[in-house]
């Protein structure tokens, strides 16, 4: 099993350089499995991290990271041998932009739920803009003005953000079932990595395996830039961070 460095704490999401040992490779498909990694694999609407592996006098470009049962780093260039210790370096500007966008998504999803009881049914993060799909939704662009203000107030107040591992029973007492459907998570998972925003998670309490900032003020200012109806009561909101 690969140790996922960013899983164990919010501060660990800021690891951008790490040594690791190569434990398995495929020279034809050019992927590498490490004993530990800080690379985020494509998933949950967040794109893959990119970066490099450095070893001896050479380096390989990490162009994609995928997670099935194991985390596979797809590389361009030489493939390091099994047993090699590599230094992984993440393209930090890109990852940090994704981290901020993903954390902002928690806020926007929470505020839309609070105001309109619309559930987040999809999302896509990019470094410069992102979107979230809500259902059932009927709000107008005008309705979104107080939403944007509420999100920015939470950021300005620099409300707390925490990462806790919670038992399934404990988290079900925190979250509203209509918003977060815990039954979709495999029953083998008993301890859930949970993100809490606000005092005792009152703004958002959500099981999540993603990357997040340590302080909401790092988000700057959120702008809702577009609202688009996707039919069947679904609305897409696009946002940016300035
Ligand atoms: Zn998250």
Image (cartoon, grey):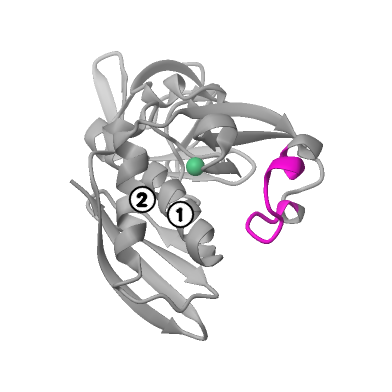
Q: Which residue is mark 1?
A: 111
Query: For the point 72% across and 39% down, which residue is it?
Result: 171
As for residue 180 lying within the magenta part, the answer is yes
Task: For ligand 1, tell me if the residue under mark 1 lies within 8 Å.
Answer: no
Q: Residues within 10 Å of mark 1 (few under 14, many from 20)?
A: many
Q: Residue at x 45, y 54 (%)?
A: 111
Name the secondary structure under disc 2: helix
Of residue 65 and residue 172, the one placed in the foreground of this image is: 172
Front position in the image: 185 or 52: 185
Find residue 150 and name its label.
2
Q: Is residue 78 magenta?
A: no
Classify residue 177 as left or right of residue 235: right
Could you say which quadrant of the image residue 133 lies in? bottom left
Q: How many marks?
A: 2
Determine which quarter of the picture holds residue 192.
top right
Q: Furthest residue to the left?
A: 242
Give the mark nearest the N terminus, 1 or 2: 1
The answer to whether the residue labelled 1 contacts the one labelled 2, judged by CB atoms less than 8 Å apart, is yes
Eyeballing the image, is 77 above or below 12? below
């Amino acid at each position: 099993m690969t140790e996922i460095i960013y899983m164990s704490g919010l501060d660990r999401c800021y690891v951008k350089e790490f040594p690791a040992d190569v434990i398995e490779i495929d020279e034809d498909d050019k992927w590498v499995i490490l004993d530990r990694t800080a690379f985020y694999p494509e998933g949950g609407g967040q794109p893959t991290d990119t970066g490099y592996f450095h070893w001896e006098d050479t380096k390989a470009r990490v162009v994609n990271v995928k997670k099935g049962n194991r985390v596979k780093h797809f590389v361009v260039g030489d493939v390091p041998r099994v047993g090699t210790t590599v230094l992984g370096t993440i393209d930090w500007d890109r990852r940090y932009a994704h981290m901020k966008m993903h954390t902002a998504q928690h806020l926007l999803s929470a505020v839309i739920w609070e105001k309109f009881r619309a559930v987040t049914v999809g999302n896509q993060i990019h470094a410069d803009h992102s979107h979230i799909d809500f259902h059932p939704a009927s709000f107008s662009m005008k309705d979104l003005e107080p939403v944007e203000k509420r999100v920015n107030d939470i950021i300005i107040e620099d409300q707390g953000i925490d990462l806790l591992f919670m038992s399934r029973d404990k988290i079900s007492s925190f979250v509203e079932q209509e918003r977060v459907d815990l039954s979709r998570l495999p029953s083998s998972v008993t301890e859930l990595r949970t993100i809490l925003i606000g005092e005792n998670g009152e703004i958002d309490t959500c099981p999540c395996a993603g990357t997040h900032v340590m302080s909401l003020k790092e988000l700057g200012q959120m702008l809702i830039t577009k609202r688009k109806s996707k039919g069947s009561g679904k609305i897409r909101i696009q946002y940016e961070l300035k």
